[in-house]
Image (cartoon, coloured by chain):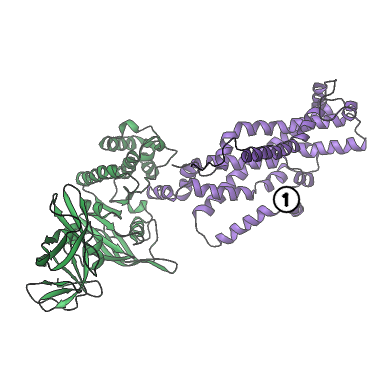
Chain colours: A purple, B green
Amino acid sequence: MTIVGKTKSSPGFVRSRWLLTGVLGIYFIYTFLPLIYVITASTKTNPDLFTSFGLWFSSDFHLWQNLSDLFTIQNGIFLQWLWNTFYYALVSGLGSAVFATFAGYAFAKYDFFGKKFLFALVLGAVMIPQTALVIPIFLLLSKIGLLNTPLAVILPSLVFPPGVFLMRAYVDEAVSNEIIDAGRVDGAGEFHIFSSLAFRMLMPGVTTVFILSFVASWNNYFLPLVVLNSTEHFPVTVGLAQWYASAVSGSGGSLLFTVVMAGALVSILPVIIAFLIMQRFWQGGLGAGGVKA
Amino acid sequence: MAVIALKDVKKTFGAVNVIGNVNLEIADGEFVIFVGPSGSGKSTLLRLVAGLEDTTGGQILIDGADVTNLGPAERELSMVFQSSALYPTKTVRQNMSFGLEVQGLPKPQIRERVDRVAEVLKLTEYMDRKPKALSGGQRQRVAIGRAIVREPVAFLFDEPLSNLDAALRVEMRIEIAKLHQRLGSTMIYVTHDQVEAMTLADKIVVLDRGDIQQVGSPMELYERPANLFVAQFIGSPKMNVLPGRTDGNAIAIANNGAIPLGSKAPDGIVKVGSRPENIALVPEAEGHIRGTIDVVERLGSDTFAYVAVEGLETVTVRIVGNAANVGVGQKIGLTFDPQQLHLFAADGKVLGR
């Protein structure tokens, strides 16, 4: 007599699979509903926005007009905002990835006085919400006179504690101590070992940190809101919020709601495309340990 | 003059004493092997010589110069690691050139040296491959090539064959032996495998828990071990060690019999050692001690008989060729060659030498 375990067709298995699918389905709907709304809303005229069914297109497909309005309102300021966002996110992303890699490498490969304490600080920093830090950062930037400049957004964004944490784990997995020792025996200095040997082995992890930081920067609202006050420096998040506020108060004209929706759609597209392109690096990075010499 | 000398070298990790007081001299062109069980400190000692670890005390001299405070490259040493430690994002050629590029040698000279070494190690067709496209044996050859190219004062090997399968290990062992013959360079090699130690070394350093137990040629260590640890570490199968005590002109083996010697036995005997090939199987009545054959292993070239002796551990006996008359369950006598006995005192040291 053979004892048979759960197979694909056994009732218990099928039931639990359906339950899981159901739960995931509900979560999928919850996540995508706002996105569907944004997509459909940006194709409607303003009256249609308030009268037609929210989650599906209306009879009047107005997307191109909305997009045209988006890029022409206020002398095409939206394009400037889009560029600002891209610029802040790119520089912050690259900078924070590099710094996080330096720090992660140091924590993983070297022993130094206060290492445990410093790493505990990094861990603590991961847990502090950004909103709690924005006012102290504002005061700091004010003192050095950097308020209302791009650096006001970029400099604080170069600090990315989750990236340090991620890179430390990744360096531990991906760079073996023997390779570093081999580099030392070959006569390379510590920085040379890092830059010409270790860094290339860390590319999946670095890319992951870059993407996470890039997206965090792209979506950042509160920091730029506090440290910037000139419209030409705004990223898309702050700009759209400003338009939305004026649409609500009625001062900007009723055109603005649909433009805000179109703006929201345009602002998320680049990140989605970037994610899709970077997918192979991203998955490799988070699944640390897949790279072995 | 010794090419490499260690004077009173000590190493502690926090409160743990990993290397005790080590004094050692290695002559030019010698193949020295550090051997010992896991945790004996052999890798640590190698890394101290390499400059990858700092000493807690003592000096390391190379060619008479004190290099204790110098890094590995400044000591002009090369190292081959257990996992080959090739740079995974670089090709074989780039791996071998890296050390020379760091030194700042001109490109044509680097190319010429690398090509020459690659030809000797038969790596020429792999030069543009990355390490992940090579087999384990090929990777180790590249690692050896990377070490040779730097023309160091000495080569250091840290268990380079441990990650290879058995057949490849034998092949690479012979290649390393030939390499030593060809280059004539000083080599320090770490292994836990005493077969590698016996076959490759000019001189073996046996380590246990951070202390040197004995230094000598393979045959010296085999035939004249200084203490119980060395006696049982070197030689496979292990030396048989039985409890014994002085009994006039003989050595009494606990409750089982006695081994007569030609002259008075030294005082203070606690244990007696005899290698499997120095014990003979004889009819029960004629043996110094008596037992029953438990297991017989026939390897074709040798036969090993494992004899159960009452009150003692199993005694291993080696017979050359296939001993057809030896069978399980036979009651047998064992005679020990008195010229080949190793007598140990209570502290493990050997007596009478």
Q: Is residue A221 above or below residue B265?
A: above
From the viewer's perspective, is A141 left or right of B109? right
Looking at this view, is B116 or B107 the one in front? B116
| Relative image position of residue A252 (x, y in whole percent) | 90, 33
**Mark 1 falls within which chain?**
A
Question: In which quadrant of the rendered image does the N terminus of chain B lie?
Answer: bottom left
Which residue is at a point 72% across and 40% down the rendered structure image? A219
Q: Secondary structure at mark 1?
A: helix
Which residue is at a point 18% across and 65% down the rendered structure image?
B291
Mark yes or no: residue B28 visible: no
Which residue bears the numbered disc 1? Answer: A130
Q: Tell me residue B123's x, y (percent).
A: 31, 35
Q: Residue A153 location in percent, x, y?
A: 72, 44
Q: Residue furthest left?
A: B262
Q: Is residue B123 visible?
A: yes
Whether residue A82 is situated above or below residue B271 in the rendered picture? above
Tell me the amino acid under the disc marked 1: Gln
Left or right of A8? Residue A179 is left
Q: Nearer the viewer, residue A292 or B2?
A: A292
Front one among B225 and B238: B238
Task: State whether residue A33 is above or below residue B240.
Answer: above
